Image: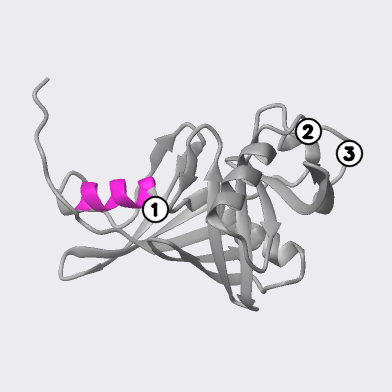
Amino acid sequence: NGIRCFAKYVYDNRINTAKSFTIETGAGVMIPELIVENEKVLFVKVNMGAPQLERSEIPMLGAAGKVINESLQIAGKDYRITSLLMGVPHTIVFIESLEEDELISIGKQIEKHPSFPKGTNVNFVTVMNDHEINVRTWERGAGRTLACGTGSCASAVASTLNGLTGNEVTVHLALGDLFIETIDGIVYMTGSANHVFVGEVDI
């Protein structure tokens, strides 16, 4: 999400008017593609790279292999999880419904579960149909968040891996929608970015 906002800012302020350019981040080089109308950015498409599916890459303790629809015990209850690395670790739990206080409680416990030596983000996903999902995210080190780009990508990938959706998924978040597609193993995220306010900071 931050990359889309940054790309829009760079273009709208004429710092770089190319419709595609590279941005170096802690998670690697991102290459946003700007969809422009009347010299204003409407949407930004970002190549998010390939998800890492091996347990050791997440990282997660246990036998080698992929973590798809695997059992995880939390407070004596069995949760089915799918975990992967999408720049950062993500764990997906498919649910039909979940109260906010329960989401926070379970999110905290999965984030710090001993199976994840570096912790994990937790995404609670409700599948609406074969091309739409709702996502709510508990972000490691930050808590409940209203939108997460890598979490949306990871949730879409997990939905496909579990045979619940196809390779093109619209992700509904509290603050808007993202369109996630996987092409030849690479995940692409497309969404809007909106100018909210301008301020000055005296340093």
Looking at the rendering, the stretch of residues picked out in magenta corresponds to 2-11
> Which tag is nearer the camera, tag 1 or tag 2?
2
Q: Which residue is mark 3?
A: 64
Judged from the image, the secondary structure of the residue bearing numbered disc 2 is loop
* Amino acid tagged 1: Pro
Tag in front: 2 or 3: 2
In this image, 190 relative to 131: left or right?
left
3 part of magenta stretch: yes
Per the picture, the main secondary structure of the magenta-coloured stretch is helix
Give the residue type at disc 3. Ala
Residue where numbered disc 2 is placed: 115
Q: Position of residue 184 (x, y in %)?
A: 65, 62
Disc on the earlier residue, 1 or 2: 1
- Judging by the rendered image, the residue that carries numbered circle 1 is 32
Q: Quadrant of residue 44?
A: bottom left
Residue 54, position as x, y percentages in the image: 78, 42
3 or 1: tag closer to the N-terminus? 1
- The residue lying toward the viewer, choosing from 195 and 35, is 195
* Residue 129 x, y percent position in the rendering: 63, 79
Inter-mark Cα distance, 3 to 1: 34 Å
Label pair 1/2, CB-CB below 8 angstroms: no
Q: Quadrant of the C terminus?
A: top left
Q: Is residue 49 visible?
A: no
Marks 1/2: CA–CA distance: 34 Å
Labels 3, 1: front one: 3
Q: Are marks 3 and 1 in contact (CB under 8 Å)?
A: no
